[in-house]
Amino acid sequence: MKLLLVEDDPLVANSLMLALGGSGYAIDHVSDGGQAQISIATETYDLIILDLGLPDMDGLECLRTIRKRIIKVPVLILTARDAPKERIEGLDAGASDYVTKPFHLGELEARIRALQRLALGCDIVVETGELKWNTKTRTLCRGDEVVELSAKEHACLEVLLQNLNTLVTKQRLSSILSGDDAPVSFNAIDIIIHRLRKRLEPYGVRVQTVRGLGFRVEQ
């Protein structure tokens, strides 16, 4: 899952990038609305976390511009503005959720997962082979056994399971896994998929390679 973080406070931004990156999310960070517009015009994101107190424009103006370009992407406002009127304005402007600072990281991650489930429009549990992937807890299990994966392996599998029986290109995987300061090359994608395939084959899950294009998991 690839996120765009629009936050001008370096302490908040660095803390979120460290925490969410450790949970397997790929994150691009920008510090103002103008950079946010460029990012959404050139990249595809699964979710946007948006501060309202931006240095170059009001966050609500940025949100309205995002909504003109992208209708469906979830936008989570993360702001110090906590008055009921301001919450209403944010939601009416097109926010999917509204969280005020200071915030609890665990709650923020739960809200991100909830927005992800809504965006997926699918059941909470996805089954393939002998495994079940829980979109709420983001865990992969066979019965009571948890199948442990690295953060990047899990991120790849998450995209593949969201697109069962459908080709996922290397470009798409690279875009999702890459952050601003940590690009993931096609060769790295091949290595991650190779390791993921070895982990999943004993459970009857096949990650197929479509030569020159990408990968898919068939149910």
Image (spheres, rainbow, N blue to C red):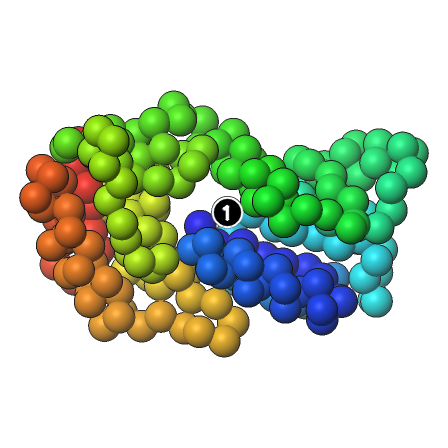
Query: Where is residue 92 shown, x and y percent of the image?
Result: 79, 32
- Closer to the camera, 37 or 173? 173
- Closer to the camera, 131 or 170? 131
Residue found 63% across the figure and 49% down from its top: 105
Residue found 91% across the figure and 38% down from its top: 83
Can you say which quadrant of the picture contains the C terminus?
top left
Category of crowding for the residue at label 1, using alpha-carbon neighbours closer than 10 angstroms: few (below 14), some (14–19), many (at least 20): some
Label 1, on which residue?
Answer: 46
**Does residue 69 appear in the picture of this structure?**
no
Q: Amino acid at mark 1?
A: Asp
Query: Where is residue 32 shown, x and y percent of the image?
Result: 74, 66
**Does residue 88 appear in the picture of this structure?**
yes
Q: Is residue 184 above or below residue 170?
A: below
Is residue 2 found left or right of 77 in the rendered image?
left
Residue found 49% across the figure and 60% down from its top: 21
Is residue 109 found left or right of 144 in the rendered image?
right
- Looking at this rendering, what residue extends furthest in the front direction? 144
Residue found 66% across the figure and 35% down from its top: 96
Is residue 67 found left or right of 143 in the rendered image?
right
- Looking at this rendering, what residue extends furthest in the top direction? 123
Q: How many marks?
A: 1
Query: Where is residue 43 shown, x and y percent of the image?
Result: 50, 59
Question: Mark 1 falls on what kind of element?
Answer: loop
Q: Quadrant of residue 100?
A: top right
- Closer to the camera, 144 or 121? 144
Is residue 41 found left or right of 35 in the rendered image?
left
Q: Is residue 137 above or below residue 194?
A: above
Query: Where is residue 218 shown, x and y percent of the image?
Result: 16, 36
